Image (spheres, rainbow, N blue to C red):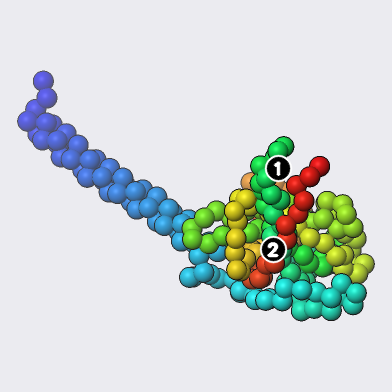
Amino acid sequence: MESLDDVIDAMIADRVIHRHRRKWLIAIALVVVLAVVIFFTGGWKEKEGRTVPTLTNLVTTVDEATKVGTATTVSAGKWEFSFSKAEIVRTPKDKYTEAKAELRVYFDLKNIDTEEQTSDSLPGKLLVLVPGGGKDTIESNGADCRGELNWVVVYGLPPESCFTKFDVPADFAADLVEIGVLGEHYESDNGLLGANEDPYWHNPSPEAVVQLKPTVTVASGEK
C-alpha cells in the first residue's frame, strides 16, 4: 500500500504535468493562429504591406509597325520581362459552347541565365494574376512565342515577343490588372539532409507586381 507521502508526491507530479501540458497546448495554438494570420495577410494578395515593388504601365497600345511603346522591364531569376500591354479576350456564347474569357498579357522575354547559360521555356508558375481582396492568385500558362506554347528561349539571343494567358471567369472585367512576377534562385539544397549540394534554379519568390490597363476584344465563337 502506498504511503500518504507517495500519494501526495504523485498528486503534485500529476498537477505539474497538466500545468506544463496546458502551456504547450496554448503555445501550439498560438503558433497555428500566427501561421494562419501570416498566410492570409502576407504575400501580394493585398496591396497593403506588399514587400515587392509595384510597377505601373498604363499604355494600352503598341505600334505594331515600329514596335514603339512603353514597356515595363523586370528581371527575375533567369528571365527578363518587358511588359507592354494586356487584353481581355471575350468569346460569346453560341449554340455549341458557353461564353468564356481569357486575359492575355504581352511581353518580350529574354533568357539571362548567366549561371548555366542554357536554353529553357518559361514555367507558368512564374507569372501569376493577382486578383487582390484575399483571393488566390491565378497561374499563367507559360509563354506563347512565335505561335508556340512553351517556346524554348535560347540564352544569349535577343528577346522573343511572347504572351501568356490566364483563365478568368466569362464576366471578368477590370480597369487595371496586376501581374505578379516570381524569380527562381540559383542555389543548392541543404546538404545536411543528404541532398545534392550543386546549385540549380528553384525556390521561386515574388520579385515585382506589374500593373497594366487592359483593352477588351470580342473573339468569334464560331468553329
Q: Position of residue 37 (x, y in %)?
A: 41, 57
Q: Quadrant of residue 158?
A: bottom right
Residue at disc 2, secondary structure: strand
Disc 2 crowd, CA 10 A, few/some/many (<14, 14-19, 20+):
few
Q: Is residue 113 visible?
A: no
At 64% from the left edge and 63% from the top edge, which residue is drawn? 180
Residue at 14% in and 35% down: 11
Q: Residue furthest left?
A: 4
- Residue 173 located left or right of residue 11: right
Residue furthest to the right in view is: 157
Q: Is residue 54 visible?
A: yes
Of the pair 49 and 194, the residue shown nearer to us: 49
Residue 25: x %, y % from top left:
31, 45
Disc 1 residue type (three-letter)? Asp
- Residue 75 pos. (x, y %): 74, 70
Q: Residue at x 61, y 74 (%)?
A: 53
Task: Please tell me which residue is depicted at 83% across the width and 51% down the height of the picture.
Answer: 149
Q: Depth-wise, is mark 1 or mark 2 nearer the camera?
A: 1
Q: Which residue is mark 2?
A: 216
Compared to residue 84, the image places residue 26 above or below, namely above
Mark 1 to mark 2: distance in Å? Answer: 19 Å
Outermost front residue: 95
Between 17 and 178, the one nearer to me in the picture: 178
Q: What kind of residue is marked 2? A: Val
Q: Which class describes the residues within 10 Å of circle 1: few (<14), some (14-19), or many (20+)?
A: few
Tag 1 and tag 2, C-beta contact below 8 Å: no
In the image: residue 138, left or right of residue 112: left
Residue under label 1, please give it: 94
Q: Secondary structure at mark 1?
A: loop
Give the camera-side residue of 60 and 77.
Answer: 60
**Which quadrant: the C terminus?**
top right
Earlier residue among tags 1 and 2: 1
